[in-house]
Image (tube, helix red, strand yellow):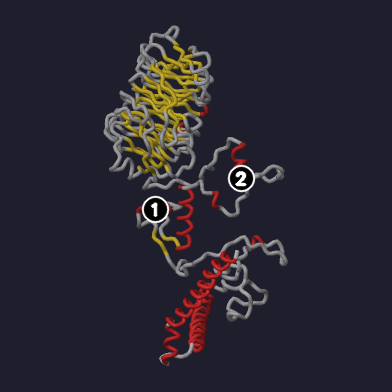
Amino acid sequence: MTSLISQNALPKRRLEKDDSSSSDEETMGSPVASDAEAGKKPRPEDRRKERRRKKKALQARQGQEADEMRRLESSLFGNIYTPLEFGTEAGAAVPARGQGDAPLFFVDRSAGDDLPVYEEDLGSEDEVVDKGRKPAWVDEEEDSTEVDILKVARLRKLRKEADERVISGKEYEARLRGHHAKLNPFTGWADMDRKAPLRDGDSDEEEGGVDNMLRNNDELVVKGTAKLLPGMLDYSRLVDANAQDPSSGPINSVQFHRNGQLMLVAGLDKHLRFFQIDGKRNPKIQSIFVEDCPIQKAAFLPDGSEVILSGRRKFFYSFDLVKAAVSKIGPLTGREEKSLESFEISPDSRTIAFIGNEGYILLISSKTKQLIGTLKMNGNVRSLAFADGGNQLLSSGGDGHVYHWDLRTRKCMHKAVDEGSLSGLSLCTSQDSSYFATGSSSGIVNVYKRDEFLGGKRKPLKTIENLTTEMGQMKFNHDAQILAISSRKDRNGMRLVHVPSFTVYQNWPGPRFSLQYPRCLDFSPGSGFLSVGHAGGKVLLYKLHHYQNA
């Protein structure tokens, strides 16, 4: 036992000795101790005092710099480092550093201390509603600045009247904002004052938000009521309507469905195609092959239930959109026509008028598809157009006259010469039947006021002579502000006429776009889209920016 204790005692004493020797070595080897013994530097406590003094001086300089920065920021941006206190002015001095505890939060007053209040939002003198927001920056020269919107071509679309020229800077800004909102209508989510969508349990009296929008099938964009200006037309080219399935032959018919999203395309390749028009992809919905009939014309019934298609045959076809069934109709009883390629459908979807032989017009019931009557004019019939909601029919042909027929009595109610026309090839009426236009074999288009024409006035409102070859299809848009005229025998033979001023748009079709040889055209129900089918088998699609609805 004694030997074990003595053996353990020796290492302990050695450990204490080693610790003491190492501490002596550290003390002897320290530069501070050696320098102090040598008398080269002051004592350690003096050095600590010197360091504390320098540290305090550095902190004082940093504090002064920070206070100076705070003062400058406060003068430029307001008091952003101190919480808002009642009775404190915006220009009040910032409390010195260290006089109080630092705030845990602050109120951002960088936009200024005065919140604008609109007069219409004031309920009473005691109640103030701060709905408005003050602009971050206001140009003081806006009121004195004047902008000439007629001189610069790209600013002419901002005019409200044709002869408007100079506007103020503030009005110029407002019109630019309005034009941007028209081109980008789906930005309501950024409106800070819009109503939030209803949640479960909310009052049904306050409707709004996304939920209400999805509860109904109303149109999302309200039609604009602004007048279309002449001169330059604001439009853009979109993806071809039939880009997913182009035709292998000339296009003879294009037409929009009444919903503005479905389009039919038909031509000499014997195919009837349907596309969903969105302006981006335009996907194909269906294609129907008619084996024994190269299609010369196809059209929707105005009620949107059927498609009538015909060619140079004794018969025609009906395609039921609901049942997806094709029916062959004809030959017509008691008639010897070898071709029923041209027809028009009444706006009330009750009557289909076919062009027959030797000046006959064949009236077919759209319900029974049976012949219900005929009309006879002098000379050959070349074109037809309905008016007055389907109660009247206009016709023209080889004798150069325009006939008005009353379909209720099946009698001619008016007949007059189309000025300057030797042979009428094309007719069209506006949607409200106030205007009608005639096209001749020489390319001349006459535009008439229908009431004045029936009253005995033979002089047209305007004679348009921009095309020199025989007229093809013509059509008014839905509000009769644009008249589209075309000729199949002229490359790029299509013009858009501004009806109120009877002037042709200068930038249509433009140098960058080729219409080739246009054969058919159509406006969408809201005139937001314009489609043009040409002999190359494509259907060109354009967006008219003045109209917000398809």
Viewer-nearest residue: 485 or 61 = 61
Picture coordinates of residue 116, whole percent (x, y)? 60, 66
Viewer-nearest residue: 227 or 50 = 50
Question: What is the quadrant of the N terminus in the image?
Answer: bottom right
Viewer-nearest residue: 214 or 166 = 214
Residue hosting label 1: 156
Determine the CA span between mark 1 and mark 2. 36 Å
Relative height, residue 299 to residue 146 (above, below): above
Picture coordinates of residue 97, whole percent (x, y)? 58, 80
Viewer-nearest residue: 269 or 472 = 269
Identify the image quadrant of residue 295: top left
**Amino acid at dot 2:** Gly
Picture coordinates of residue 88, whole percent (x, y)? 64, 77
Disc 1 crowd rating (10 Å Cα; few below 14, some 14-19, many 20+) is many
Relative height, residue 186 to residue 521 (above, below): below
Residue 209: numbered disc? 2
Q: Nearer the viewer, mark 1 or mark 2?
A: 2
Residue at the spot 51% in from the left edge and 16% down from the top edge: 365
Label 2: which secondary element: helix
Label 1: which secondary element: helix
Q: Earlier in the sequence, mark 1 or mark 2?
A: 1
From where the camera sits, is residue 456 visible? no
Residue at the spot 36% in from the left edge and 11% down from the top edge: 338
Relative height, residue 396 to residue 186 (above, below): above
**Amino acid at dot 1:** Arg
Most distant residue in the bottom direction: 39
Disc 2 crowd rating (10 Å Cα; few below 14, some 14-19, many 20+) is some
192 with respect to 54 (left or right): right
Most distant residue in the front direction: 2
Picture coordinates of residue 292, whole percent (x, y)? 36, 12
